[in-house]
Amino acid sequence: MKFEVGKKYYCASACDHECIFEIKVIKRTEKSITYNYMGETKRSKIHYWDGDEEIIPERYSMAPVFRARG
């Protein structure tokens, strides 16, 4: 699956599954997406996992991972 412009994607925290993170895709290229995350506009490189696109908006051990899934 691919990230689509205008759609929202969700991810539960690794530590607390009641804590839900959200992104909304603003635009995309073949290699990156621009999105709103926690009130900020960010851009991330797209990675692939098991045929689906994924991004990691922050870099720390328990950071949320957003995947475009069907």
Image (cartoon, grey):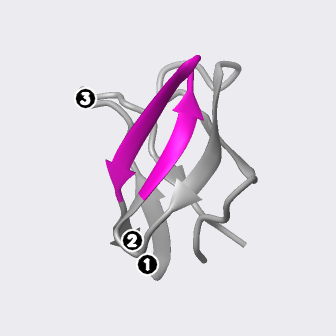
Q: What stretch is highlighted in magenta?
A: 33-45
Residue 63: within the magenta? no
For numbered disc 1, what is the local secondary structure?
loop
Q: Mark 2 points at which residue?
A: 49
Residue 40 in percent (x, y) is at 51, 21
Q: Please report contact status of discs 2 and 1: CB closer than 8 Å, yes or no.
A: yes
Q: Mark 3 points at which residue?
A: 61
**Which mark is drawn over residue 15?**
none
Which residue is pictured at 74% across the width and 53% down the height? Answer: 6
Residue type of the residue flagged with mark 2:
Trp
Residue type of the residue flagged with mark 1:
Asp
Q: Mark 1 points at which residue?
A: 50
For numbered disc 3, what is the local secondary structure?
loop
Q: Residue furthest left?
A: 60
Instruction: Compare residues 59 and 39 and report the one nearer the observer.
Output: 39
Residue 54, by quadrant, is bottom left
Q: Label 1 to label 3, Cα distance in Å? A: 21 Å
Residue 4 lies, with reference to residue 16, above or below; the image says below
Indicate the quadrant containing the N terminus: top left, top right, bottom left or bottom right: bottom right
Residue 13 in percent (x, y) is at 54, 27
Residue 22, by quadrant, is top right
Residue type of the residue flagged with mark 3:
Ser
Which numbered disc flags the more N-terminal residue, 1 or 3? 1
User: Is residue 5 found left or right of 37 in the rendered image?
Assistant: right
